[in-house]
Image: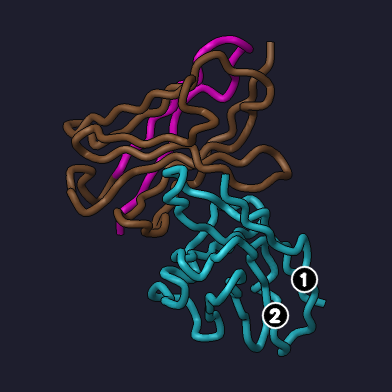
Protein backbone atom coordinates (compact mmCIF):
# COMPACT_ATOMS: atom_id res chain seq x y z
CA UNK A 1 0.00 0.00 0.00
CA UNK A 2 1.48 3.33 -1.11
CA UNK A 3 2.36 5.63 1.78
CA UNK A 4 3.36 9.29 2.00
CA UNK A 5 5.28 10.93 4.84
CA UNK A 6 5.87 14.64 5.32
CA UNK A 7 9.04 15.92 6.97
CA UNK A 8 10.55 19.28 7.77
CA UNK A 9 10.97 21.88 10.53
CA UNK A 10 8.00 22.45 12.78
CA UNK A 11 8.93 26.06 13.47
CA UNK A 12 9.84 28.74 10.93
CA UNK A 13 10.56 32.41 11.58
CA UNK A 14 8.55 35.12 9.86
CA UNK A 15 9.97 36.26 6.49
CA UNK A 16 11.95 33.02 6.14
CA UNK A 17 11.34 30.07 3.80
CA UNK A 18 9.21 27.07 4.73
CA UNK A 19 10.59 23.87 3.21
CA UNK A 20 8.92 20.48 3.43
CA UNK A 21 9.60 17.11 1.83
CA UNK A 22 7.21 14.27 1.11
CA UNK A 23 8.68 10.78 0.87
CA UNK A 24 6.74 8.20 -1.13
CA UNK A 25 7.11 4.56 -0.08
CA UNK A 26 5.79 1.23 -1.38
CA UNK A 27 5.36 2.79 -4.81
CA UNK A 28 7.14 4.92 -7.40
CA UNK A 29 6.85 8.66 -7.76
CA UNK A 30 7.90 8.22 -11.39
CA UNK A 31 4.57 6.90 -12.57
CA UNK A 32 3.09 9.08 -15.29
CA UNK A 33 -0.35 8.17 -14.04
CA UNK A 34 -0.25 10.50 -11.08
CA UNK A 35 0.48 13.97 -9.80
CA UNK A 36 1.69 14.78 -6.31
CA UNK A 37 0.22 17.60 -4.29
CA UNK A 38 0.37 19.72 -1.17
CA UNK A 39 -2.67 20.82 0.84
CA UNK A 40 -2.68 22.79 4.08
CA UNK A 41 -5.11 23.36 6.94
CA UNK A 42 -4.76 26.26 9.39
CA UNK A 43 -5.72 25.39 12.96
CA UNK A 44 -9.50 25.04 13.24
CA UNK A 45 -10.05 25.93 9.59
CA UNK A 46 -10.68 24.23 6.26
CA UNK A 47 -8.49 22.77 3.56
CA UNK A 48 -6.52 24.85 1.07
CA UNK A 49 -4.82 23.42 -2.01
CA UNK A 50 -1.23 24.65 -2.44
CA UNK A 51 0.08 23.05 -5.63
CA UNK A 52 0.83 19.91 -7.63
CA UNK A 53 3.86 18.46 -9.38
CA UNK A 54 4.46 15.37 -11.49
CA UNK A 55 7.50 13.15 -11.97
CA UNK A 56 8.87 15.30 -14.78
CA UNK A 57 8.61 18.50 -12.76
CA UNK A 58 5.49 19.96 -14.35
CA UNK A 59 3.74 22.13 -11.79
CA UNK A 60 0.59 24.12 -11.22
CA UNK A 61 -0.03 26.27 -8.20
CA UNK A 62 -2.76 27.99 -6.26
CA UNK A 63 -2.81 31.50 -7.76
CA UNK A 64 -2.91 33.04 -4.29
CA UNK A 65 0.43 31.43 -3.39
CA UNK A 66 2.13 31.28 -6.77
CA UNK A 67 4.45 34.24 -6.26
CA UNK A 68 6.00 32.64 -3.13
CA UNK A 69 5.94 29.00 -4.14
CA UNK A 70 8.30 26.52 -5.76
CA UNK A 71 8.06 22.76 -5.90
CA UNK A 72 10.58 20.13 -6.95
CA UNK A 73 10.76 16.38 -7.42
CA UNK A 74 13.61 13.93 -6.83
CA UNK A 75 12.81 10.66 -8.55
CA UNK A 76 15.94 8.95 -7.24
CA UNK A 77 14.92 9.57 -3.64
CA UNK A 78 11.22 9.12 -4.43
CA UNK A 79 10.50 12.50 -2.90
CA UNK A 80 8.89 15.80 -3.76
CA UNK A 81 9.32 19.10 -1.98
CA UNK A 82 7.63 22.39 -1.23
CA UNK A 83 9.31 25.75 -0.69
CA UNK A 84 7.23 28.72 0.44
CA UNK A 85 9.07 32.03 0.82
CA UNK A 86 8.42 35.09 2.97
CA UNK A 87 6.18 33.27 5.42
CA UNK A 88 3.91 34.99 7.93
CA UNK A 89 1.74 33.78 10.77
CA UNK A 90 -1.01 33.17 8.19
CA UNK A 91 1.08 30.28 6.85
CA UNK A 92 0.81 28.42 10.16
CA UNK A 93 -0.99 25.18 9.34
CA UNK A 94 -0.89 21.42 9.11
CA UNK A 95 0.68 20.63 5.74
CA UNK A 96 -0.38 17.45 3.95
CA UNK A 97 1.12 15.80 0.89
CA UNK A 98 -1.13 13.63 -1.24
CA UNK A 99 -1.34 11.68 -4.48
CA UNK A 100 -3.76 12.82 -7.15
CA UNK A 101 -4.85 11.77 -10.61
CA UNK A 102 -4.70 13.84 -13.79
CA UNK A 103 -7.84 15.27 -15.37
CA UNK A 104 -9.64 16.58 -12.32
CA UNK A 105 -9.00 13.46 -10.26
CA UNK A 106 -9.25 13.29 -6.48
CA UNK A 107 -6.52 13.24 -3.84
CA UNK A 108 -6.75 9.55 -3.08
CA UNK A 109 -3.83 8.89 -0.73
CA UNK A 110 -2.71 11.34 1.95
CA UNK A 111 0.21 11.64 4.33
CA UNK A 112 -0.44 12.05 8.03
CA UNK A 113 0.40 15.75 7.90
CA UNK A 114 2.98 17.90 9.65
CA UNK A 115 2.32 20.98 11.75
CA UNK A 116 4.30 24.10 10.84
CA UNK A 117 4.22 27.13 13.10
CA UNK A 118 5.44 30.49 11.89
CA UNK A 119 6.72 32.45 14.87
CA UNK A 120 9.76 34.35 16.02
CA UNK B 1 -12.45 32.43 -8.12
CA UNK B 2 -14.85 29.52 -7.79
CA UNK B 3 -16.52 29.13 -4.39
CA UNK B 4 -17.99 25.98 -2.86
CA UNK B 5 -20.42 26.56 -0.01
CA UNK B 6 -21.32 23.92 2.57
CA UNK B 7 -23.49 24.14 5.70
CA UNK B 8 -21.27 24.51 8.77
CA UNK B 9 -22.96 21.70 10.61
CA UNK B 10 -25.42 18.83 10.22
CA UNK B 11 -26.86 16.81 13.10
CA UNK B 12 -28.39 13.38 12.65
CA UNK B 13 -29.64 10.57 14.86
CA UNK B 14 -28.09 7.12 14.59
CA UNK B 15 -29.73 5.02 11.91
CA UNK B 16 -31.08 8.05 10.05
CA UNK B 17 -29.86 9.71 6.85
CA UNK B 18 -27.49 12.68 6.66
CA UNK B 19 -27.37 14.88 3.57
CA UNK B 20 -24.48 17.31 3.11
CA UNK B 21 -24.79 19.90 0.38
CA UNK B 22 -22.02 21.55 -1.63
CA UNK B 23 -23.18 24.59 -3.57
CA UNK B 24 -21.35 26.07 -6.53
CA UNK B 25 -22.24 27.90 -9.71
CA UNK B 26 -23.30 25.29 -12.28
CA UNK B 27 -21.44 22.64 -10.28
CA UNK B 28 -23.13 19.97 -12.40
CA UNK B 29 -20.49 20.72 -15.07
CA UNK B 30 -17.68 19.79 -12.71
CA UNK B 31 -16.61 16.52 -11.13
CA UNK B 32 -16.95 16.52 -7.35
CA UNK B 33 -14.96 14.60 -4.79
CA UNK B 34 -15.76 14.22 -1.08
CA UNK B 35 -13.47 13.72 1.90
CA UNK B 36 -14.05 12.67 5.49
CA UNK B 37 -11.76 14.07 8.19
CA UNK B 38 -11.91 12.78 11.73
CA UNK B 39 -10.29 14.78 14.57
CA UNK B 40 -6.51 14.68 14.45
CA UNK B 41 -6.45 12.71 11.21
CA UNK B 42 -5.74 13.41 7.57
CA UNK B 43 -8.69 13.66 5.19
CA UNK B 44 -9.79 10.42 3.52
CA UNK B 45 -11.52 10.11 0.15
CA UNK B 46 -15.09 8.77 0.44
CA UNK B 47 -16.64 9.69 -2.94
CA UNK B 48 -14.91 10.55 -6.24
CA UNK B 49 -16.15 11.57 -9.68
CA UNK B 50 -19.51 12.57 -8.17
CA UNK B 51 -20.75 9.07 -7.35
CA UNK B 52 -17.94 6.51 -7.12
CA UNK B 53 -16.80 4.93 -3.87
CA UNK B 54 -13.19 3.89 -3.20
CA UNK B 55 -12.70 0.33 -2.07
CA UNK B 56 -13.38 -0.04 1.62
CA UNK B 57 -15.95 2.76 1.79
CA UNK B 58 -19.36 1.42 2.84
CA UNK B 59 -22.29 1.53 0.42
CA UNK B 60 -24.00 3.77 2.97
CA UNK B 61 -21.99 6.64 1.43
CA UNK B 62 -23.32 7.96 -1.87
CA UNK B 63 -23.02 11.10 -3.96
CA UNK B 64 -24.99 13.07 -6.51
CA UNK B 65 -24.46 16.22 -8.55
CA UNK B 66 -27.10 18.31 -10.26
CA UNK B 67 -27.70 21.94 -11.09
CA UNK B 68 -25.88 24.14 -8.58
CA UNK B 69 -25.63 21.55 -5.80
CA UNK B 70 -23.68 18.38 -5.18
CA UNK B 71 -24.76 16.19 -2.27
CA UNK B 72 -23.09 13.60 -0.09
CA UNK B 73 -25.60 11.25 1.51
CA UNK B 74 -24.83 9.00 4.44
CA UNK B 75 -27.51 6.38 5.06
CA UNK B 76 -28.01 4.50 8.32
CA UNK B 77 -25.65 6.85 10.10
CA UNK B 78 -23.33 5.37 12.71
CA UNK B 79 -21.41 7.00 15.54
CA UNK B 80 -18.19 6.43 13.60
CA UNK B 81 -19.42 8.71 10.81
CA UNK B 82 -19.02 11.75 13.05
CA UNK B 83 -16.43 13.89 11.27
CA UNK B 84 -15.85 16.93 9.08
CA UNK B 85 -16.72 16.49 5.41
CA UNK B 86 -15.30 18.51 2.50
CA UNK B 87 -16.27 18.66 -1.15
CA UNK B 88 -13.67 19.48 -3.82
CA UNK B 89 -13.61 20.33 -7.51
CA UNK B 90 -11.17 21.44 -10.18
CA UNK B 91 -11.87 24.96 -11.40
CA UNK B 92 -10.80 25.05 -15.03
CA UNK B 93 -11.30 28.82 -15.29
CA UNK B 94 -8.52 29.53 -12.80
CA UNK B 95 -6.65 26.22 -13.11
CA UNK B 96 -6.79 25.26 -9.51
CA UNK B 97 -8.37 22.90 -7.03
CA UNK B 98 -11.02 24.28 -4.72
CA UNK B 99 -12.24 22.80 -1.45
CA UNK B 100 -15.60 23.48 0.11
CA UNK B 101 -15.95 25.26 3.43
CA UNK B 102 -16.52 21.99 5.28
CA UNK B 103 -19.43 20.50 7.24
CA UNK B 104 -19.23 19.06 10.72
CA UNK B 105 -21.50 16.04 11.07
CA UNK B 106 -22.64 15.34 14.60
CA UNK B 107 -24.31 12.05 15.49
CA UNK B 108 -26.83 12.68 18.24
Residue furthest to the right in view is: B108
Q: Nearer the viewer, residue B31 or B102?
A: B31
Tell which chain the image draws in brown: A
The residue positioned 65% from the left and 73% from the top of the image is B81
Q: Which of A83 and B22 is in front in this view?
A: B22
Q: Which chain carries label 1?
A: B
Q: Nearer the viewer, residue B64 or B106?
A: B64
Indicate the position of residue B4 as horizontal and vertical percent values. Answer: 62, 56
Question: Of the numbered discs in the image, which one, if any, rests on residue B10?
Answer: 1
Tell which chain the image draws in cyan: B
Which range is magenta? A1-24
Question: Of the numbered discs in the image, which one, if any, rests on residue B18?
Answer: 2
Dot 2 alpha-carbon crowd within 10 angstroms: few under 14, some 14 to 19, many 20 or more: many
Q: Mark 2 lies on which chain?
A: B
Nearest to N terminus: mark 1 or mark 2: 1
Q: How far apart are marks 1 and 2 (CA)?
A: 7 Å
Please, is residue B23 above or below residue B40 in the view?
Answer: below
B94 to the left or right of A94: left
Amino acid sequence: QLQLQESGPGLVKPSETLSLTCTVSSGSISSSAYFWGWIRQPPGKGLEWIGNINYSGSTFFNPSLKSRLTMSVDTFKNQFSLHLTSVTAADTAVYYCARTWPNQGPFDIWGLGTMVIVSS
Amino acid sequence: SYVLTQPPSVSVAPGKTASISCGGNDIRTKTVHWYQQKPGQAPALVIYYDTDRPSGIPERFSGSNSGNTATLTISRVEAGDEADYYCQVWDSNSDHFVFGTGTKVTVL
